[in-house]
Image (tube, helix red, strand yellow):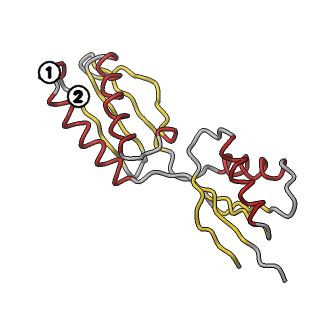
């Protein structure tokens, strides 16, 4: 009997790296001349998986976002997994913005990935949704490599990660 190989398709961020990037960005912003004496903040809520940015005006908020993006990118946090919300007015004529952190595939994304694999009509390749991951299995390792390259070509709105390779 032929052995089957499989891998998991997931997405996510390392919250330790996000926390470190927020700390670094906050330190840089508080030391910058154009931010001296201003009430600015970047808050990370790991339970809610959100970042909150607050600044006196939209221009300063966008400058903070640029600094934060640079720190996140340097720490290999996928920027595709961050969804910026609308800039909202806040107290004392300031503005704030919530940034949602996508950690794990949503049910819709998992279905879309599984549908994409099935639509490719690759022989003996099966995709099974397991919570926030998609398990792809096939007796042929070459077919699995084809699935990986197929998924890398498509844009699902998040950075996909391939892991948990197994041969049964």
The quadrant the C terminus occupies is bottom right
The quadrant the N terminus occupies is bottom right
Name the residue: 33% across, 44% down: 44
Quarter of the figure with residue 16:
bottom left
Q: Position of residue 147 (x, y in %)?
A: 74, 54
Q: Residue lying at the far left in this picture: please name it.
A: 37
Q: For label 2, count other residues whose C-alpha is less than 10 Å away and answer few (under 14), some (14-19) or many (20+).
A: many
Q: What residue is disc 2 on?
A: 40
Q: What residue is disc 1 on?
A: 33
Q: For label 1, count other residues whose C-alpha is less than 10 Å away and answer few (under 14), some (14-19) or many (20+).
A: few
Q: Nearer the viewer, residue 156 or 148?
A: 148
Quarter of the figure with residue 97:
top left
Identify the disc placed on residue 130.
none
Residues at discs 1 and 2 in contact (Cβ within 8 Å) = no
In the figure, is residue 27 to the left or right of 65?
A: left
Q: Nearer the viewer, residue 22 or 137?
A: 137
Q: Residue lying at the far front in this picture: please name it.
A: 142
Q: Position of residue 82 (x, y in %)?
A: 47, 38
**For numbered disc 1, what is the local secondary structure?**
helix
Up/down of 27 relative to 63, above or below: below
Q: Position of residue 103 (x, y in %)?
A: 50, 50
Q: CA distance from mark 1 to mark 2?
A: 13 Å
Q: Position of residue 69 (x, y in %)?
A: 38, 34
Name the residue: 49% across, 35% down: 83
């Amino acid at each position: 009997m032929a052995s089957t190989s499989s891998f998991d398709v997931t997405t996510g961020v390392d919250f330790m790296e996000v926390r470190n990037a927020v700390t670094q960005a906050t330190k840089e912003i508080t030391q910058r001349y154009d931010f001296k004496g201003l009430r600015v903040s970047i808050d990370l809520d790991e339970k809610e998986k959100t970042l909150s940015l607050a600044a006196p005006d939209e221009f300063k908020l966008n400058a903070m976002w640029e600094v934060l993006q640079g720190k996140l990118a340097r720490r290999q946090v996928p920027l595709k997994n961050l969804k910026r919300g609308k800039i909202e007015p806040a107290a004392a004529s300031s503005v704030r913005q919530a940034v949602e952190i996508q950690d794990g595939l949503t049910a819709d994304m998992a279905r879309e990935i599984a549908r994409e694999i099935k639509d490719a009509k690759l022989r003996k390749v099966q995709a099974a949704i397991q919570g926030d991951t998609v398990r792809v299995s096939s007796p042929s390792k070459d077919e699995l490599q084809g699935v990986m390259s197929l998924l890398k070509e498509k844009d699902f709105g998040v950075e996909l990660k391939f892991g948990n390779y197994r041969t049964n």
